[in-house]
Image: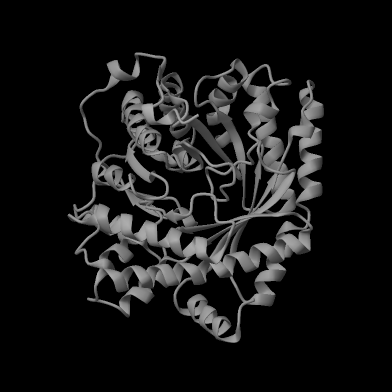
Amino acid sequence: MINIFEVAETNDMIEKENLDVRTITLGISLLDCIDSDVNKLNEKIYDKICTVAKDLVKTGEEISKEFGIPIVNKRISVTPIGLIGASACKTTDDFVSIAKTLDKAANDVGVNFIGGYSALVAKGMTPQEELLIRSIPDALCSTERIMSSVVLGSTRTGLNMDGVKLMGEVIKETAQKTKDADSIGCTKLVVLCNAPDDNPFMAGAFHGVTEADSIINVGVSGPGVVKYALEKVRGQNFEVLCETIKKTAFKVTRVGQMVAREASKRLNIPFGIVDLSLAPTPAIGDSVADILCEIGLEQTGAPGTTAALALLNDQVKKGGVMASSYVGGLSGAFIPVSEDQGMIDAVNAGALTIEKLEAMTCVCSVGLDMIAIPGDTPNSTISGIIADELAIGMINQKTTAVRIIPVIGKGVGDNVEFGGLLGHAPIMPVNGFSCEAFVNRGGRIPAPIHSFKN
């Protein structure tokens, strides 16, 4: 139980330091909806989502009101549609019809987003999974709440380079189809290596096939809380610094677990995990980059940035696992550009480049996230960036991801405004040398030697 002192302390974190529960995500299995008739499949999907999730938003609002804890988003994740639609879908239009069904269900139950328009193709693609991937641009430009993800590799399987090449094309096509809205479709599309089955954060959320029929996962976030705590120990040694981060992460995770268990009890759906990810927002004071500066950097991107981020990520995880036996998902520090004002400032100051961000992803909780690049960037260059990032995940046995936005009609020096939690971003330069011959080789990069642990 949380005692009265912790309640008062939590209230301060909420009121002054931007603490919130970023999302309650309800995972729903659609395996029992599979049908060879696409119309029946869509009907079953809609009915199940609307039945299981009918009270999700209301429950989240009630908990938020009763406990005084902001719950920013209520979301749904479903079994990857590449699996669910395999029997029924013969064309890309068939898959797009499922996307529209998911979008309608999400709208009707009132959630912000629904994730799981996904394909798990870490080693190879079935014809149906390839159809789903090729349908992504049409699906994202014809829906509002759909989030899409494609898993292209893992430590155990290696990297599917055919899929990497295809996703370079798909990302560019998605950008073209949503160019009138600054290519915003790409903000809803992520590619991953070593994707977890229980991630509550979009756009990478899907309900893994290892999960129960339905599950409650909660994502908490508190960059502002960590920064405020570190201000009180400014100039002290690393031992004090680490203990402060760890204790703060413990407190934030306790809040998340309390919300998760309460939602689980009220909805009569099992509690899955708490994801303690320091997920920034465009709000001033809610920045991971600002934490790194508080640790001692003049600007994020300066020498020492990767070490500071490694320290932060590790202490967040240590504090989280002491607070809950069920910490999962991604849990660590996110380093998106457009969603973090401190990161944007670092890019504009010339301190932060894509190459430095890539180095930082070796020790953060995800990868290259919400990065806007010139709209004329070649497909093969996008694929090369994906390959680099996923290779980091494969070799280091961690989740890595790429959510990159080639903004059609804009170049280096321009800015793009996405709005809301998606924020705004400067267009970042990319390396102009070609990797086309590398990307066009085809096949897959084999799993690393340390993957063989049987």
Q: Is residue 83 above or below residue 270?
A: above
Q: Nearer the viewer, residue 46 or 295?
A: 295
Decide which of 197, 69 is in the foreground and name it. 197
Q: Is residue 280 visible?
A: no
Which residue does the image show at 76% across and 63% down from the upper left?
265
Q: Residue at x 44, y 71 (%)?
A: 248
Could you say where residue 82 lies in the image, as x and y percent from the top left? Answer: 63, 27
Q: Quadrant of residue 39?
A: top right
Position of 56 with respect to 368 (left or right) is right
Find the residue positioned furthest to the front: 454
Against 340, residue 384 (above or below) is above
Q: In the image, is 219 to the left or to the right of 450?
A: right
Q: Quick check: 24 left or right of 398?
A: right
* Quadrant placement of the N terminus: bottom right
| Residue 125, horizontal then vertical, whole percent | 54, 19
Colour mode of the rendering: one colour
Tell me if residue 340 comes above or below residue 170 in the rendering.
below
Q: Residue at x 32, y 80 (%)?
A: 232
| Tag count | 0
Q: Position of residue 267 (x, y in %)?
A: 77, 59
Q: Position of residue 60 (x, y in %)?
A: 69, 64
Camera sees residue 364:
yes
Q: Is residue 233 above or below residue 166?
A: below
